Amino acid sequence: MAEPSSSKPAVPLLKDELDIVIPTIRNLDFLEMWRPFFEPYHLIIVQDGDPNRTIKVPDGFDYELYNRNDINRILGPKASCISFKDSACRCFGYMVSKKKYIYTIDDDCFVAKDPSGKDINALEQHIKNLLCPSTPFFFNTLYDPYRAGADFVRGYPFSLREGAPTAVSHGLWLNIPDYDAPTQLVKPLERNTRYVLRSSFIVVTNFRVHVVNEFQLNPCFVYVHVLFTKLLCMFFRYVDAVLTIPKGTLFPMCGMNLAFDRQLIGPAMYFGLMGDGQPIGRYDDMWAGWCVKVICDHLGLGVKTGLPYIWHSKASNPFVNLKKEYKGIFWQEEIIPFFQSATIPKECTSVQKCYIELSKQVKEKLGAVDPYFTKLADAMVTWIEAWDELNSTTSEEASSKSANGAAAATK
């Protein structure tokens, strides 16, 4: 069942079938690092914040840019379902795309390197994940059986080895972990990374190594002093694995390195109401992930997590994050059991029908937790209405709803 190894394709995979969606408030200089991997693809840039600001995009990229004025013009009153002053606005890019696949990435995410030092083509790995089946109904202990060098282990039912279509590929991050504010505060120096020794000061006492000055390294035990150089090179928490998240299991989805099949699950990729005027933030991607997973389980679709890695370059302010998250930290103790027990009637055979059904249950069961959830449930319905309206227009109508946000090419 393992796929044969292949050399780098001459034509980028899914070149005409995939859009890259990037939410931003700043110039997109980070794209220069991604040029070898992203330049062949079409970009959808969703500008948050001040719509009068001009976003600079490096020369050579094929893109369209939408700001808040564009969102209001295209969606009219239904624009209320798109968050403002929050990266949740990225889901507007999912809505206006006409491609089968979406890859979304944050503008503080850079190209990571694998343990050999080679640049990781995150987009290519996501595409491979999406094009291979998932195994949500029976867990394969040897990771993804469809990857080269792996297969189904002894005892895996032959009747399930065809797998299920993969709807979501959830990538991970090196360097700055995706932690909540309380964890950030108690682990301010924790990094999911390797460390290169520069002008650092090494202290070895009782076989415990400390690196201070330019880099902070969590203490580790070594046997002899001469091993410390090799150990520093090994501090690279890179796990070469892709797993299918089992049916019935939720997960905290992170939107900074995420790909999905828009035709299979796109209407459920709503990142909720966050940011300006809302009582909560930093739960946008997780809310979408919980909805998506329940619907994928119902429709028999798969969700993968693991490779590829990106390099998350910037740690956000934990005190600012705590202000955004603090209600969510309490609410999630109600939200998670809600999704764990949520059931969708068999009559719901499309993503839209499933999502509308979930919105009803959100209003009924979470509305008692806080009025915000009643508002969110209404926004979920508005989102589906806007999605269907925008994705059923004729090409002539669609052309009148094109982007016109200000952008400037940089040399």
Image (cartoon, grey):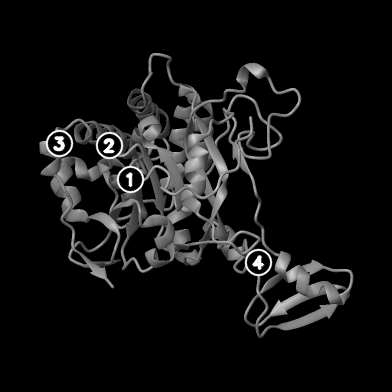
Label of residue 136 in the image? none
Q: Is residue 367 visible?
A: no
Q: Earlier in the sequence, mark 2 or mark 4?
A: 4
Task: Give yes or no for contact between labels 1 and 3 (Cβ–Cβ under 8 Å).
Answer: no
- Report helix, strand or loop for mark 1: helix
Q: Is residue 119 visible?
A: yes
> Vertically, is 291 above or below 28?
above
Name the residue that disc number 4 marks: 194
Q: CA distance from mark 1 to mark 2?
A: 10 Å
Label of residue 383 in the image? 2
Q: Amino acid at mark 3?
A: Ser
Task: Give yes or no for contact between labels 2 and 4 (Cβ–Cβ under 8 Å).
Answer: no
Label 1: few (<14), some (14–19) or many (≥20) C-alpha neighbours in 10 Å: many
Q: Residue at x 38, y 18 (%)?
A: 348
Task: Give yes or no for contact between labels 1 and 2 (Cβ–Cβ under 8 Å).
Answer: yes
> Vertically, is 149 above or below 184?
above
Label of residue 91 in the image? 1
Name the residue that disc number 3 marks: 395
Task: Give yes or no for contact between labels 3 and 4 (Cβ–Cβ under 8 Å).
Answer: no
Q: Earlier in the sequence, mark 1 or mark 3?
A: 1
Q: Residue at x 22, y 44 (%)?
A: 80
- Report helix, strand or loop for mark 2: helix
